[in-house]
């Protein structure tokens, strides 16, 4: 009896600790219920979840409040089996590694579970996993399902949901809140349900039902979508661990041409938080130094769009006039300040000059927006806006481009700083605990005494480590660098790599690996980092744009043969064009269903029955964004565009900060640096001119589309100091049949469609 009491006390202590979590599960079924049994890694405490299978259209979940030992749990299952022998007893269904969520279309509820996983890294001993296999089960028993009116559209919604491939680019952790940055993890006291509400948890909608009923997150995993890579690198004969994480926002999420700009809540398309963490590679139980830095990318925060078209390889940009006071733009930057603190530094990589205005339309209006917002902000909190045209001078070398972008990074890091601390093990051991607050908020605001004069105790709740740590904090990051081009893919990825390389030198210097804050861009460590950023860029580009990224600058630095690079870029352009024109509508359908932006209802139109505008802007409340948009070019007022000489002088000294440079330029923090190459990584700039594409070996597929596009060229007229696009177009001019676009890909070979979806090689 004494042994049982001791085990019960141990179970209760685990359950009451902040590190209580389940990570392995077994799913059983009877005719009336599903039973899920979950236990911790040490097999110390066991919990039981019951899901009702007799209710045809409602989700009813009960959690047994008791925490069992393994023997007690086995005894409970035996009794459940004996009590259900008349209807078949208790049957094993599957081994699981967590619940992804629950969903309902027009028929029954389904629940999704992880059935296979693989470990892809760890952070302070907390394992990080990817999904290798998942399953979806209808909840009602087959006898209940047979009596339900099964909609003919039910299977179609199921197939849409399965288009979101959970085995690609999703990752999670049971014990480490992977949805927030390392600095925020140390400073954030929020746990459980609150963490699932963050913008980077993609299954928040799917888990809402179970969370509302149980008020805990024991049974679910929080899925982050984007990129995760962890490698061990060497410098100065010392190993360190580099982790690169990209988290895509679930707000206003979608594909390239169907999600652009900003929405009314200030959320932008392709919003990605990139975090670079460096750990000392030390033995378990030794003090470990950690440094982390975060940067951001996201669509230009204005109301703008481009219509997907099979007749136009480079669709016109449509800029809405409805947000005259830039309220949505302001909300976006207020959100960035709340997430990261001040200053917010904006690196805008779109074009300065075009024969046919496209990007320059947004360039001017973005400048107007920043200037308008800054007028109401105190000088110290004003947005720092820089413009770097990556396509103006075609002969500049890739190496020089990175050097100049590196100068931007150096100044940005001087303004924001980076996170650096040391974790020192204490004498406490044998406890399963969790990281706790260090006394500063997520944006880096803090009390000097708390951070710099006191050691702050942090408990470690890891899979592999035991005990507690003291955090000796050196610096925190306050503010963020936000980079964008048009798509926030190719040029943006080069800019983020340049920032990551400079940040890495500062991180390694802070950790004592190198004596100087400088690493040669041609060094082995720089090439290792470039390959990781290139992989991240390809991954994000496939998710949003439909092809791997255009990596001309990276290819040039590696010394890749130009003809090979051009061929590669051409086929990636072809792949992206096909994906955007023919496959994105169905991908957007799948994302809208997965995220809960569209919820089917009996008697309401199906998702595929909506017209294009309704289809791509569906919201949970059923409203549609139908704001009138027109194509125009805002005036580019004087005083915003300056000569290269001024900026050469401004950036020539490493000690000059951005806010000091801004004093050269009127009331706006708008900087215009026109020196980078048109051979830079530009996913928006096709590899060849249209005439080259028509005469290429692939003209059989594209010639008709290009010819039709040339016939449909839009006329321009003078407007202020710029040029104007047509202000009126009919619905037929700007939209295409969404249903037809979903079916067209079936006309192409299976091999071609696979290449578009997954990349790799088209012609082996």
Image (cartoon, rainbow, N blue to C red):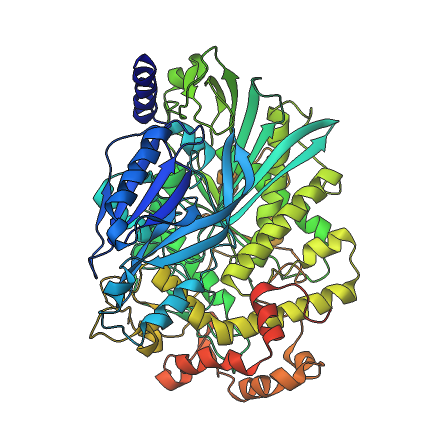
Q: In the rendered image, which quarter contains the N terminus?
A: top left
Residue 388 on image: x %, y %: 57, 54
Q: Is residue 635 left or right of residue 263?
A: right
The image shows residue 625, relative to residue 596, as above or below, that is: below
Residue 268 on image: x %, y %: 39, 56
Q: Residue at x 23, y 54 (%)?
A: 59
Relative depth, front residue between 461 and 87: 87
Relative depth, front residue between 542 and 117: 117
Relative depth, front residue between 136 and 306: 136
| Residue 26 appearing in the image | yes
**Residue at the extreme front of the image, as rendered:** 86
Q: Is residue 412 left or right of residue 726?
A: right
Q: Residue at x 54, y 89 (%)?
A: 711
Q: Residue at x 79, y 54 (%)?
A: 559
User: Where is residue 694, by image quadrant?
Assistant: bottom right
Relative depth, front residue between 72 and 553: 72
Residue 287 on image: x %, y %: 56, 18
Residue 465 on image: x %, y %: 51, 24
Q: Is residue 574 left or right of residue 101?
A: right
Q: Residue at x 39, y 37 (%)?
A: 341
Q: Is residue 268 left or right of residue 749?
A: left
The image shows residue 253, relative to residue 726, as above or below, that is: above
**Residue at the extreme top of the image, as rendered:** 427
| Residue 683 appearing in the image | no
Q: In the rendered image, which quarter contains the C terminus?
A: bottom right
The image shows residue 443, relative to residue 90, as above or below, that is: above
């Amino acid at each position: 009896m004494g042994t049982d009491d001791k085990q019960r006390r141990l179970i209760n202590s685990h359950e009451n600790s902040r590190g209580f979590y389940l990570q392995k599960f077994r799913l059983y079924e009877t005719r009336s219920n599903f039973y899920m049994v979950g236990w911790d890694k040490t097999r110390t405490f066991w919990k039981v979840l019951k899901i009702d299978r007799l209710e045809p259209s409602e989700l009813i979940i009960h959690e047994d409040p008791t925490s069992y030992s393994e023997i007690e749990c086995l005894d409970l299952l035996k009794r459940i089996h004996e009590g259900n022998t008349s209807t078949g007893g208790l049957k094993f269904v599957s081994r699981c590694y967590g619940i992804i969520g629950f969903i309902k279309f027009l028929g029954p509820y389904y629940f999704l579970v992880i059935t296979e996983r693989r470990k892809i890294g760890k952070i302070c001993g907390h394992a990080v996993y990817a999904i290798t296999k998942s399953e979806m089960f209808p909840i009602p028993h087959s006898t209940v399902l047979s009596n339900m009116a099964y909609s003919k559209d039910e299977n179609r919604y199921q197939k849409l949901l399965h288009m979101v491939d959970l085995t690609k680019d999703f990752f999670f952790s049971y014990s480490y809140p992977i949805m927030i940055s390392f600095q925020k993890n140390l400073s954030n006291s929020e746990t459980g349900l609150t963490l699932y509400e963050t913008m980077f948890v993609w299954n928040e909608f799917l888990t809402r039902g179970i969370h509302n009923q149980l008020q805990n997150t024991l049974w679910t995993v929080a899925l982050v979508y984007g990129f995760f890579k962890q490698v061990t690198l060497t410098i100065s004969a010392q190993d360190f661990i580099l982790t690169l994480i990209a988290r895509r926002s679930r707000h206003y999420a979608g594909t390239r041409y169907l999600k652009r700009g900003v929405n009314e809540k200030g959320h932008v398309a392709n919003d990605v938080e990139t975090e670079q963490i460096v750990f000392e590679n030390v033995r378990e139980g030794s003090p470990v130094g950690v440094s982390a830095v975060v940067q951001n990318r996201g669509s230009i925060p204005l109301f703008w769009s481009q219509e997907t078209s099979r007749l136009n390889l480079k669709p016109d940009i449509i800029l809405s006039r409805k947000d005259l006071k830039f309220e949505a733009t302001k909300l976006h930057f207020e959100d960035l300040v709340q997430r990261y603190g001040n200053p917010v530094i904006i690196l805008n990589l779109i074009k300065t000059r075009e024969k046919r205005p496209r990007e320059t339309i947004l360039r001017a209006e973005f400048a107007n927006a920043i200037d308008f917002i800054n007028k109401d902000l105190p000088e110290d909190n004003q947005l720092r806006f820089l413009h770097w045209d990556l396509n103006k001078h075609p002969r500049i070398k890739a190496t020089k481009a990175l050097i100049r972008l590196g100068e931007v990074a150096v100044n940005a890091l001087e303004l924001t700083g980076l996170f650096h601390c040391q974790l020192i093990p204490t004498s406490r051991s044998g406890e399963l605990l969790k990281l706790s607050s260090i006394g500063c908020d997520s944006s880096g605001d803090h009390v000097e005494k708390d951070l710099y004069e006191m050691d702050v105790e942090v408990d470690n709740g890891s899979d592999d480590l035991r005990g507690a740590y003291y955090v000796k904090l050196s610096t925190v990051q306050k503010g963020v660098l936000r980079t964008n081009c048009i798509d926030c893919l190719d040029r943006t990825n080069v800019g983020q790599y340049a920032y990551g390389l400079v940040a890495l030198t500062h991180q390694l210097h802070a950790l004592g690996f190198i004596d100087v804050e400088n690493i040669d861009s041609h060094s082995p460590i720089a090439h290792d980092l470039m390959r990781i950023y290139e992989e991240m860029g390809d991954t994000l580009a496939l998710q949003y744009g439909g092809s791997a990224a255009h990596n001309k600058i990276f290819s040039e630095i590696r010394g890749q043969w130009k003809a090979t690079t051009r061929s590669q870029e051409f086929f990636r352009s072809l792949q992206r064009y096909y994906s955007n024109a023919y496959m994105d509508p169905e991908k957007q359908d799948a994302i809208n269903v997965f995220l809960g932006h569209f919820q089917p209802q009996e008697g309401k139109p199906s998702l595929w029955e909506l017209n294009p505008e309704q289809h791509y802007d569906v919201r949970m409340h059923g409203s549609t964004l139908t704001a009138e948009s027109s194509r125009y070019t805002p005036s580019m007022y004087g005083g915003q565009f300056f000569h290269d000489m001024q900026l050469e002088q401004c950036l020539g000294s490493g000690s000059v900060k951005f806010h000091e440079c801004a004093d050269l330029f009127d009331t706006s923090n708008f900087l215009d640096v026109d020196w980078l190459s048109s051979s830079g990584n530009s996913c928006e700039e096709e590899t060849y001119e249209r005439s080259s594409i028509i005469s290429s070996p692939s003209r059989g597929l594209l010639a008709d589309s290009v010819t039709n596009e040339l016939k449909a060229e839009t006329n321009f007229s003078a407007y202020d100091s710029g040029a104007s696009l047509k202000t009126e177009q009919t619905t037929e001019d700007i939209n295409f049949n969404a249903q037809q676009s979903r079916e067209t890909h079936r006309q192409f070979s299976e091999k071609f469609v696979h290449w578009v979806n997954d990349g790799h090689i088209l012609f082996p």
